[in-house]
Amino acid sequence: MLLLFFIQLTVVLIFLLIGWAIVKKEAYGLISSFRSRPKEEQEELIQNGYPQKTGKLLIGTAIVLLIMLPLLFTSFPYAMEVQIGVMVVLLLGGFIYLSKYEVPKKRKKSYIISTSIAVVTFGFLFVVSYLGFQEAELTLRENSFEISGVYGDEWRFEDITQVDLVEEMPEVYLRTNGYGMQSISKGHFKVKDYGSSLLFIYKGNSPYLLIKTNDDTIFINSKDAEKTKDWYYQLVEQSGEAE
């Protein structure tokens, strides 16, 4: 939790510093592509207030994120996701609005580009969020079990070496390829004492089902504790492996 706090605080400070430099010190070179523009365009942008409004956008975004930081220490399960969403909306929406202050001959193009980027970004985030928050289902077949969804796969019962229920999730200290947010972890992570592991977990929803096979270490749970326990008993019955 503290790590997430300091990461977001760093983002806030960077936005504040860049915004302050643009607004107060007229460091317009910090704005992407500003320096590469012809002198006439630079002067027109300054006259239109484009650089100043860009700086104020960054400062405003930083202030909103700073106000939302305490959410990380509440019981609200989607604090991180909400803060990222708000930041994306403010920045992308802000850049669409800034197109209004572009030089006239590039204004329409700026609207098209900024709007297209926003649509693609929102679409990508929607798909990733939808797939990431889909609950993984563990299904038993005749000779194997399958975990559904992104990062899911199928494993044979004969490859299982251990099945166990753990009340506390071991420390997850590194995401190598996966979806890791405040409330959910899905994909490949490094887990203390277990090394590289495949996670399908809702944080804070014990117990967690630990499955070890010849090739993989898997942690999975459901929002419903009884469902997780049912998976455990079914796997033990089918595989004959339990700690």
Image (cartoon, rainbow, N blue to C red):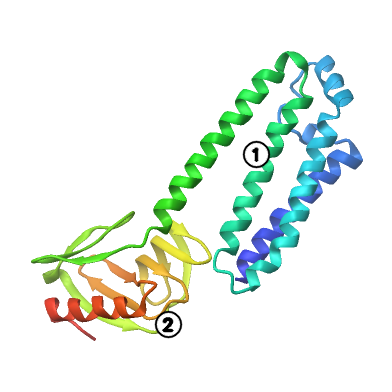
Residue 111 horizontal/vertical position (percent): 66, 25
Q: Hey, what amino acid is under mark 2?
A: Glu
Type of amino acid under label 1: Leu
Left or right: 86 in relation to 243: right
Q: CA distance from mark 2 to mark 1?
A: 39 Å
Q: Residue sitting at 35 percent across and 71 percent down?
A: 222
Q: Quadrant of residue 139?
A: bottom left
Instruction: Name the residue rendered at 86%, 29% in the picture.
Output: 49
**Relative to 38, is 126 on the left or the right?**
left
Considering only order in the chain, which callout, 1 or 2, is on the residue closer to the N terminus? 1
Residue 177 visible in the displayed image: no
> Callout 1: 10 Å neighbours few (<14), some, many (20+)?
some
Residue under label 1: 92
Q: Report the number of numbered marks.
A: 2
- Left or right: where 46 falls relative to 110: right
Residue picked out by circle 2 = 168
Q: Is residue 156 visible?
A: yes
Q: Position of residue 36 (x, y in %)?
A: 74, 22
